[in-house]
Amino acid sequence: MTMHHDGRKGTPLGDDYAAVERQIAALGGAILPGRRHRDQVLEHTSDSVGRTRNQRRTVQVTLVMAMLLVLVSPLIGALTRVQPPHPQTADQTNAAALRHAEASQMSFDWALVDIFRQFRERKRADMR
């Protein structure tokens, strides 16, 4: 006598397995994918591939933009950097006042006043 898998006496376990396998085979033949199911699977796959492609393209564009920004930003910084004019030193101002005094036949003090006035006028013109 053979034992059932649940402990009952009766038909052998092999018969139960064979019955289950027959039921699964019968169900497998009854469940067939229809045209609608095929179309849904194809649409889902196409959408998935499209999303993946878009994500990959977005990453590529982002990387290219980041590389361009890294490469171009020093150039932009160099082009937009404005160097303020350096003020004249005391020696340069004295030399200019001496030249102006000799050319205008005036004293060094008044030449120095003219040099400062010219500097102030240029500074005002630059600020406009």
Image (cartoon, rainbow, N blue to C red):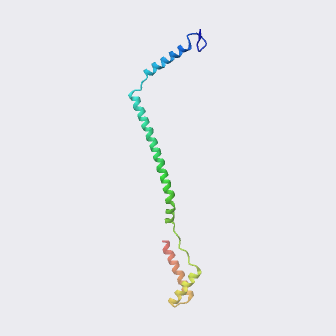
Q: Is residue 34 left or right of residue 81?
A: left
Residue found at the very far right of the displayed protein = 7
Residue found at the very far bottom of the displayed protein = 105
- Viewer-proximal residue among 55 and 3: 3
Q: Position of residue 105 (x, y in %)?
A: 51, 91
- Viewer-proximal residue among 35 and 126: 35
Q: Position of residue 33 (x, y in %)?
A: 41, 26
Q: Quadrant of residue 94?
A: bottom right
Q: Is residue 74 left or right of residue 45?
A: right
Q: Is residue 26 above or below residue 119?
A: above
Task: Give the position of the N terminus as an image quadrant.
Answer: top right
- Residue at left 41%, top 29%? 37
- Residue at left 54%, top 81%? 116
Q: Quadrant of residue 8?
A: top right
Residue found at the very far left of the displayed protein = 35
- Total numbered badges shown on the rendered structure: 0
- Residue at left 43%, top 36%? 45
Q: Position of residue 38 (x, y in %)?
A: 40, 30
- Residue at left 46%, top 19%? 25
Q: Position of residue 77 (x, y in %)?
A: 51, 63
- Viewer-proximal residue among 92 and 105: 92
Q: Is residue 112 above or below residue 124?
A: below
Q: Quadrant of residue 14?
A: top right
- Viewer-proximal residue among 118 and 7: 7
